[in-house]
Amino acid sequence: MDDYSMLVKLRLNLFVVFSSVLAYFIVAGSTVSWLHVGLIAIGGFLITSAANTLNQVLEKDFDKLMTRTANRPLAAGRMKVSEAVIFAGLTTIIGVVLLAMINPLVVLLSMLSLVSYAFLYTPLKRHSTLAVAVGAIPGALPVMIGGVAAEGQLTLIISCLFFIQFLWQFPHFWAIAYLAFDDYHAAGYKLLPVDSNDNIDSKLGLHASLYALLIIPFVVMLYISGDASIIASIVSGLMALVYLYMSLNFYITTERRTALGLMFSSFIFLPVVLISYWVL
């Protein structure tokens, strides 16, 4: 079971399900269908499991080169590729069947997430820093999927939640990639902008700050549209300002300490924002 937990990236997977279910609650308001909540949670978990499995199938030779991924079941040789592919196929089929019980758009968005993560983001990581932007799309789709499960169509609140989660990922991921730069570099991944000497671009923190700044208009938009209460908007706005501050701090002094600060603030930001929109 430990190998399958690693194969599906269990902690990441549960966070994906968490954000999708919270988005459902935010959009559904008082009209919650607990059947749909269960379908989103289980179906989303299965589709995400398939995407993460295919990611490791495609990256098994490169995972061997990184300390943080060398012990994954495929990279370490404890699991056959055929076993992982069959598992990904089964989880995809069952996940699609469950999500189809909600509405077709949920299935479409879920498959878009799987395909873009496994077959666009995964190979692009070795060729271009654009992989971060491409990967941010499936990274933000869970909230859109949860919202569409509740509403049946795209709305302003769903779009705002999508863009908040999309933009959040850039500082979050760059902080992690900065801390693990040597590992990523050893495997040939091009996830951070570098200069001609293969040193990390000194403007990385500035880029992170710009994306953090862009979150604020969507927080404001949710309040102006009446989709968020003033208390939830204040909480989310304060969290966005803290996130911006930590990103600027990373830009002013680009080092391990500030990268850790930005990374930990990113872990706090998204759950607090989503929970505030749901509860407050």
Image (tube, helix red, strand yellow):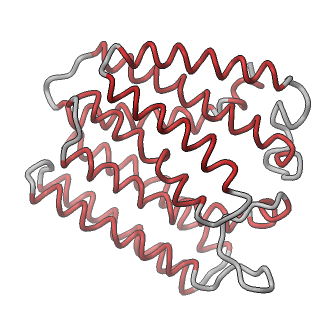
Relative to 43, 114 lies left or right: right
Give the residue drawn at x 64%, y 73%. Answer: 257
**Which of 99/224 is in front?**
99
Give the residue drawn at x 49%, y 57%. Answer: 169
Dividing the picture into quarters, in which one does residue 110 lie? top left
Give the residue drawn at x 15%, y 54%. Answer: 231
Dividing the picture into quarters, in which one does residue 35 lie? top left
Relative to 119, 180 lies left or right: right
Above or below residue 206? Residue 7 is above
Above or below residue 215? Residue 196 is below
Find residue 194 and report its horizontal and vertical position in percent: 70, 78
Find residue 254 and report its horizontal and vertical position in percent: 62, 81
Q: Residue furthest right?
A: 77
Relative to 20, 198 lies left or right: right
Above or below residue 280? Residue 196 is below
Q: State how many labels appear.
A: 0
Find residue 117 and report its horizontal and vertical position in percent: 58, 43
Give the residue drawn at x 83%, y 32%. Answer: 74
Which quadrant holds the C terminus?
A: top left
Which quadrant holds the N terminus?
A: top right
Relative to 34, 73 lies left or right: right
**Which of 267/50 is in front?**
50
Find residue 52 and report its horizontal and vertical position in percent: 64, 35
Dividing the picture into quarters, in which one does residue 142 lie? top left
